[in-house]
Amino acid sequence: MNMKKGDNPSGKVANTLVEFLEVAITMVVFLKGFYPSAAFERMRYMNVVVQRARHPELRDYIHFSASGLLPFIEKGLVERVAVIFFSNDNVPVERFIFKLTINPSSAASVEESQLEFRLRSFLVKLSASKSLVKPLPPNCRWEVTAYLRSLPEVGSSKEGELWIPTDTKQWMKPPVITPVKSLNSEPLCLQLYLEHPCLSETQPCQEAQ
């Protein structure tokens, strides 16, 4: 989880954010009870007790999903990172959304310890958010999806090879949004909130008699 931090101030902020996302995504999956609790182990990160996946494939998927975002976050292309849970017919039933913006002009003025202190509150809030989540339907699945502000330029770089375009279905009506935590401070603005489909989308239509 220890990534090399370069001399670019925006890069340092992006590295810290990517490390945070890796931990936060793991906590979301743990919070949902998608896997048995024995599939995770406790560890400390930013002086907070968090969860780490024991299974190598699960741990690697989360790690490479987060680390694969680094070049796009550094370029300011990433608008949202979502942990999406799907029903067995591939319809989203819940989204954990991390909405982010980095201001490069003020990145050099923030100490890493200050940034970690601000992000720590998200991890504390996540660990106490069990009451916010809804039970998952049987035979569901989940994935990590990134929403970009614009498509990256096509080049010789391999930085985007871990990410593929998504065919995730969209809800027909605006979702029900539940705020969880927000940070509005230089150089990082970050919001965490839940999205659920509105009630009319979760109930089948009844035919007129």
Image (cartoon, rainbow, N blue to C red):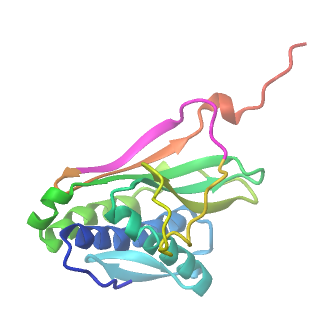
Residue 170 image point, x, y percent? 63, 41
**What residue is drawn where x is 45% and y is 58%?**
152
- Name the quadrant of the C terminus: top right
In the depicted structure, whether residue 129 falls above or below residue 51: above
Residue most toward the front? 155
Magenta stretch containing residue 138, yes or no? Answer: no
Horizontal side of 51 relative to 143 (left or right) equals: left
Q: Is residue 24 visible?
A: yes
**What residue is drawn where x is 32% and y is 60%?**
122
In the depicted structure, whether residue 187 falls above or below residue 194: below
The magenta segment is: 169-183
Relative to the observer, which residue lies in front, 125 or 184?
184
**What residue is drawn where x is 51% and y is 43%?**
195
Residue 115 image point, x, y percent? 19, 66
Residue 37 image point, x, y percent? 56, 75
Number of residue marks: 0
